[in-house]
Amino acid sequence: METIYAVGRRKTAVASIFLKKEKGKILVNAKPIADYFPTEESRSKWMKPFFAIGISNPELTYSGTIKVVGSGTTGQLGAVIHCLARALCQTLPESAGVLRKQGLLTRDSRMVERKKPYLRKARKAPQYSKR
């Protein structure tokens, strides 16, 4: 079996995947992906790359281990989706058009703006007093 390696990023989260085309489990940080992202909404989000290429039950076709670090749950979920889409694009090059059209191969570059000196947050200035 050939192992596919891909990296996905979102905010400050970085996810790397080793994907094999064999029946098995998809693990995130040594936990099943359904336990790592337990909500129904997050389940539908990480399944989106598989649904886009016509795979309804990915654990019957693929097995993989994902390591994700940084950010929070939303950023980590976005990074996992990005790395899954990139790995599927390597296994099935003809699916790249479908994945790109749904925006799954595009890296979401939005990040938190840094705090500037003399400001309370990134842009919030202290209250101005005329007198």
Image (spheres, rainbow, N blue to C red):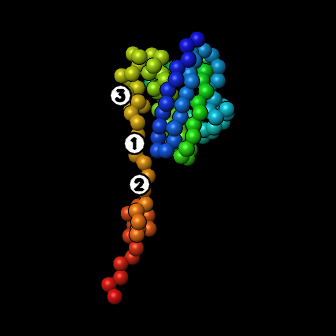
User: Which residue does the numbered mark 2 point to in the structure image?
Assistant: 113
Q: Would you identify the image quadrant in which residue 117 lies? A: bottom left
Q: Earlier in the sequence, mark 3 or mark 1?
A: 3
Helix, strand or loop at disc 1?
loop
Q: Residue at x 39, y 33 (%)?
A: 106
Q: Are marks 1 and 2 in contact (CB under 8 Å)?
A: no
Query: In this view, which residue lies farthest toward the left?
Result: 130
**Between tags 3 and 2, which lies in front?**
2
Q: Residue at x 54, y 31 (%)?
A: 16
**Badge 3 density bin: few <14, some 14–19, many ≥20, Cα 10 Å:** few
**Between tags 3 and 1, which lies in front?**
1
Inspect this view and state whether residue 41 appears. Answer: no
Q: Earlier in the sequence, mark 3 or mark 2?
A: 3
Return the x and y of residue 100 as percentages of the image width and height.
37, 27
The amino acid pointed to by label 3 is Lys
User: Which residue does the numbered mark 3 point to in the structure image?
Assistant: 101
Q: Is residue 81 above or below residue 51?
A: below
Q: Residue at x 44, y 21 (%)?
A: 89
The amino acid pointed to by label 1 is Ser
User: Which residue does the numbered mark 1 point to in the structure image?
Assistant: 109
